[in-house]
Image (cartoon, rainbow, N blue to C red):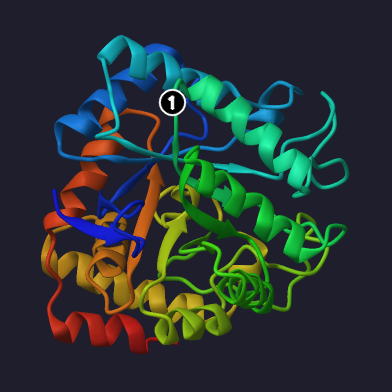
Amino acid sequence: MKYRMIGTDPKTRREVSVLALGAMLFGSLTDEKTSFAVLDRYVEAGGNFIDTSDNYAFWTDGSQGGQSEALLGRWRRSRGIGDEIVIATKLGARPLAPGTSYTDNPEGLSAKVIREAAERSRERLGVERLDLLYAHIEDRTVPLAETVEGFAGLVAEGSVGLLGVSNHAAWRVERARALAAAAGLPGYEVLQYQHSLLRPRTDVPDALFEHGSLGGATPDLLSYLRAEPDLTLVAYSPLLGGAYVREDKPLPADYDHPGTVARLAVLREVAKETGASVNQVVLAWQIGGTLPVVPLAGASSVAQLEENLAAVDLELTQDQRVRLDAAH
């Protein structure tokens, strides 16, 4: 395994594996035995960066979520896991009532919710401190300063380490970080967005986000990352839910454009040259790039995880990288 540092403060920064493990469906669609087996193998391989959320996976059974955090708590206790494993979670998108959704009934990012939701996550995970806590989705009904101060308060009291943000417009991320800096408070240091080799159109309406498709790492956001070298991008859905390799998993509509055809052609060429799978090339492209990107990949079986783990040691040549980047 290889590692990289996230965060800058010596008190809260953590060294994490360059491949993060997504635990979204653990405890719901992925049963406990399989989830434990995947987690055990990930740790055995040197992985130490696991991602979840307080609302995972509410859509599987009409609940409010929490199944993934609860399973990770049981796994930690049964394996004697301590703070050597970095567990990141999120708040803000938990439905306020069973049978509803974060699109119309989210918990939001008020100071009260931040405190109460973080406490519930700590209880489910069985930890004294949340290593990394994200603002999951935007809440434009609450003043940004209130959200910033709410998260910073948890860091000050020691119940949260690093702060992160997901699915926010780049300008709101910058504004929140500027507010924190001006007040001498800790701000967001880790950004979690959807990012992969294939690029979606950004002009396609997104039903999940009221203010447009904010979940993707847009050119604007990537430009922001280049300008702020202390930030890290955690890239969710790097393998597009299996769409690179599975005929039964078509690409989403926003990938239906000529650039997709060109990039897929080069991707398949590089996979053939390296002898690696298409998925492994995508992950290796992210891990070894100039931007600080940590791919966040889920796995519903140990076999899937093994394929992903092998990407860590796959070295792409400079020529292969140039061709992958240039295809459009």
Above or below for 234 versus 128: below
Which of the 4 image quarters holds residue 295? bottom left
Left or right: residue 176 versus residue 196 is: right
- Front-most of residues 96 and 247: 96
Where is residue 313 shown, x and y percent of the image? 11, 56
Residue 250 or residue 28, whichever sits in front: 28
Q: Quadrant of the C terminus?
A: bottom left
Which residue type does callout 1 highlight?
Answer: Val
Q: Is residue 55 visible?
A: no
**Residue 294, image x and y in percent?**
34, 59
* Residue in the image at 56% along x and 54% along y: 250
Identify whether 215 is placed above or below 90: below
Crowd tier of the residue under label 1, counting other residues whose Cα lies within 10 Å: few below 14, some 14–19, many 20 or above: some
Would residue 270 be visible to someone looking at this image? yes
Residue at the spot of label 1: 127
In this rendered view, identify the residue nearer to me: 168 or 131: 131
Q: Residue 9 at x, y = what percent?
A: 35, 61
Q: Secondary structure at mark 1?
A: loop
Q: Relative to 85, does residue 120 appear above or below in the rendering?
A: above
Query: Which quadrant of the structure image shows residue 85?
Result: top left
Query: What is the x, y in percent for residue 187?
Result: 54, 64
